[in-house]
Amino acid sequence: MKTSDPSRRKFLKAAITISAAAAAFPTILTKPVSGAKFQQVKPASPNEKVNLACIGIGGQAASDIREFERTGICNLVALCDTDMGASATQATLKSYPELPRFQDFRVMFDKMSNEIDAVLVAIPDFAHFPAAMLAMSLGKHVYCEKPMGRTFNEVQLMMNAASRYKVVTQMGNQGHSEANYFQFKTWVESGVIKDVTSFVGHMNSSRRWHGWDTKISKYPSGELIPQTLDWDTWTGTADEHEYNHDYVQGQWRCWYDFGMGALGDWGAHIMDSVHQFLNLGLPVEIDPVKIAGWNPFFFPQSETLVYKFPARGTMPPLELTWYDGLDNLPPLPQGYGGGAEVDPNIPPPGNAPVKQAQLNPGKIMYSKELTFKGGTHGATLSIIPSEKAKEMEKKLPEIPKSPSNHYKNFLLGCKGLEETRSPFSIAGPLSQLFNLGVIAAQLNSKLIFDRQKKIITNHPLANQMLVGKAPRKGWEQYYNL
């Protein structure tokens, strides 16, 4: 990557330029979704299995597929991935050699719509939107990996579609069906958690883009497209880009055009319970108080974002602070105790420099009377210091056990037997919290947000970025489903 400084003014103007370029490579379908029609899927009976199609089959998707199969209440009916030659994709294909396979989700729905009850959408962040929107418009239930979408508007459209088409939805923040969810809910209802004024979320492990040259002047140069990759379908609604290996196989998370950085990757595993059970909704202010290694193309080396939420009913105003980056640890309260050891469940950082984390991903929460610390995903909260925890021990209510993990909860929702715990109506505002944080970081500007009108009032460009650039030619229809 070259090192000449980019023009900030040029970038900000380019951020709202509407791209009208035609696709550089031919699409598989000249008329997407030519035959598939809406078909309201009736809940399966208790004795029936849910027919599940998988859009994305490598990486996190491969783990999701295994977990869905372990429930014993779904039939895998189709596999879809834009790169059938990738090693992770190949491993899944070899595990299910009998299943139909597709490179384009539009073709899959054209060929098999009547055989599909629900879909797994586990592809890059920016690509969630068209796949999920098409599935819902056809009456299919959707399990979508986190975060829901790359832009605030896309997430809003996904929430609207889920309501309009009356389909079952679930975002893939798996800990929202584990112990942390039930503990947080119980502790709020019983008054153990009350009068919370400050919440800290932190993720300080290596990320794929750590160590990259932050003074770049352009995107990476184009490379030869692998023969096994349908690059046009992979690019989807995003801006036209020449293929480069640093966009695929998980590298998409590094770039503003494709991913949501550390916040979008980990925020849903750390902030989900506090967001739901303290009724945070959307903030009134987002302030990027630290952006180290800013550039217009990929995410910072470290960032600190401060969100402000107003009083909600009897709950006081709350300040939520997000820390990421190897050199950007949050201050720890007295009596914090252990937690600095490396969490073995954190996935490797890809091609980022290997450097051990000094603090596990997690959370610190301050109320007027108590201080709490917790981990990520399903890890439960502890009251600190330990002396206070011991004093409170006999006052704490019993926490119910989860009746189903996140995958089974979704399938039971499809069968009409449970309500999903992270439907788009709950996961959407949480995802929009991340969308707003990414805009603040990308512009390195404080934003004032109107919660009722859902607009940014102090920064015209940022307000336009809630919607983002126009989709590529041929992909506009997903915004009208």
Image (cartoon, rainbow, N blue to C red):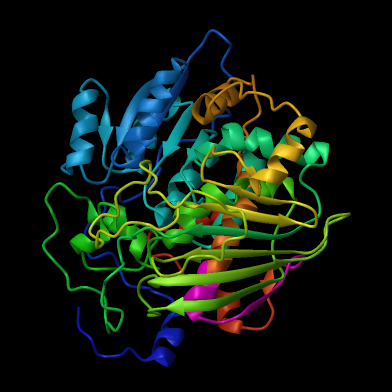
Q: Is residue 433 magenta?
A: no
- The location of residue 382, given as percent across then percent down, is 63, 42
Above or below, 407 against 299 in this view is: above
Q: Which residues are magenta?
A: 438-454
* Residue at position x 45%, y 33% in the image: 119
In the rendered view, does 480 fall on the left or right side of 295? right
Q: Is residue 168 visible?
A: no
Location of residue 466 by image quarter:
bottom right
Location of residue 351 by image quarter:
bottom left
Above or below, 407 against 277 in this view is: above
Quadrant occupied by the N terminus: bottom left
Above or below, 423 against 226 in this view is: above
Q: Hey, which residue is sitting farthest front in the picture?
A: 387
- The location of residue 367, given as percent across then percent down, is 76, 55
- The location of residue 15, given as percent across then percent down, is 44, 79
How many marks the image carries: the answer is 0
- The location of residue 143, given as percent across then percent down, is 49, 37
Q: Is residue 279 visible?
A: yes
Q: Is residue 444 magenta?
A: yes
In the rendered view, does 229 fall on the left or right side of 15? left
In the rendered view, does 4 fall on the left or right side of 42? left
Residue nearer the viewer, 204 or 413? 204
Residue nearer the viewer, 28 or 59? 59
Above or below, 32 against 246 in this view is: above
* Residue at position x 36%, y 59% in the image: 253
In the rendered view, does 454 fall on the left or right side of 67? right
Residue nearer the viewer, 98 or 248? 248
* Residue at position x 23%, y 86% in the image: 3
